[in-house]
Image (tube, rainbow, N blue to C red):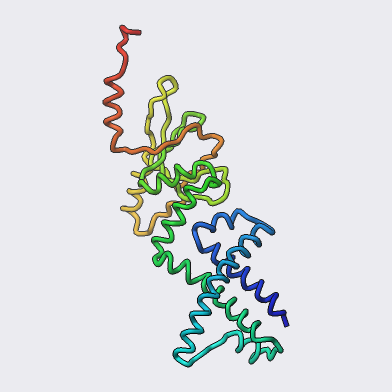
């Protein structure tokens, strides 16, 4: 049988790993760690959970004496099931470890309460993480404001669209669902929209009984080919064009 001390360390590391995986402040740090770094993170959080579990255990003992009823998982598992010759302190150690394991699930659940809040917290944490891949901030701004991104490529081709997915690790391409594509004028670099992807998708949605598979319309843009990218709001296109016309320099001044 595994020694109680070894079992104690194993349970604490598992508890620490589960908590780090399920809490937004430690999730991405854990994802980017490997080897003994992962072990140290899990062990450190496991010790924190163990400290909290001690207080929970002590509170439980007070309640047990008050209601005159006591239950011990360690006593049942180690003494009744495995019939081990262990001390009372080792039974308590096992009980506290089990409480720490339960806390690794309960604490994150109690903090988030809803899937919406958990998703929001994870999104925000990933967006502000300094080690998140390049373009991450822009992708999240697009998601939060509901605005597409205008990508200008090295060959003057432009794509306006929404990011189809956001990678947690470093990536070489951005997958977008295009709204428009076009090009920039060779001399003036003015924007010319040509292909209205959104109109085609809307027509397919209206004419087909089956749900349209948006993934078939996604385009992978290599990061090395992207010259510039920014949020693009169609509501202000006309206003910008008016101002551009006002500030054009007359030919006789050239």
Which residue shows up at 45% across the image and 49% down it?
164
The image position of residue 47, as x and y in percent, is 60, 67
The image position of residue 11, as x and y in percent, is 62, 73
The image position of residue 115, as x and y in percent, is 41, 64
In the displayed structure, would residue 160 be above or below residue 203?
A: above
Q: Quadrant of residue 225?
A: top right
119 or 245: nearer the viewer: 119
How many discs appear? Answer: 0
Q: In the visual, does 222 lie left or right of 200?
A: right
In the displayed structure, would residue 89 be above or below residue 161?
A: below
Which residue shows up at 41% across the image and 44% down it?
141
5 or 149: nearer the viewer: 5
Q: Quadrant of residue 31?
A: bottom right
Which residue shows up at 28% across the image and 38% down it?
235
Q: In the visual, does 229 lie left or right of 26?
A: left
State the quadrant of the N terminus.
bottom right
221 or 196: nearer the viewer: 221
208 or 139: nearer the viewer: 139
The image position of residue 52, as x and y in percent, is 53, 71
State the quadrant of the C terminus.
top left
Which residue shows up at 30% across the image and 12% down it?
250
């Amino acid at each position: 049988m595994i020694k109680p001390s070894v079992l104690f360390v194993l349970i604490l590391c598992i508890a620490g790993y589960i908590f780090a995986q399920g809490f937004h402040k430690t999730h991405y740090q854990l994802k980017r760690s490997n080897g003994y770094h992962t072990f140290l993170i899990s062990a450190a959080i496991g010790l924190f959970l163990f400290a909290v579990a001690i207080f929970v255990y002590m509170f439980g003992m007070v309640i047990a004496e008050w209601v005159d009823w006591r239950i011990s998982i360690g006593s049942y598992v180690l003494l009744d099931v495995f019939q081990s010759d262990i001390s009372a302190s080792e039974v308590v150690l096992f009980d506290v470890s089990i409480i720490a394991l339960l806390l690794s699930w309960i604490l994150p659940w109690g903090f988030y309460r809803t899937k919406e809040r958990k998703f929001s917290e994870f999104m925000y944490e990933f967006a502000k993480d300094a080690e998140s891949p390049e373009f991450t901030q822009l992708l999240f701004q697009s998601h939060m404001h509901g605005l597409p991104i205008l990508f200008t490529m090295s060959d003057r081709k432009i794509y306006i669209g929404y990011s189809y997915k956001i990678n947690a690790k470093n990536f070489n391409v951005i997958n977008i669902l295009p709204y428009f594509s076009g090009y920039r004028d060779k001399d003036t670099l003015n924007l010319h929209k040509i292909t209205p992807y959104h109109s085609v998708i809307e027509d397919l949605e209206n004419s087909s009984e089956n749900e349209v598979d948006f993934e078939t319309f996604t385009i992978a843009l290599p990061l090395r080919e992207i010259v510039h990218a920014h949020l693009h709001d169609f509501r202000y296109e006309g206003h910008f064009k008016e101002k551009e016309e006002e500030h054009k320099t007359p030919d006789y001044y050239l």
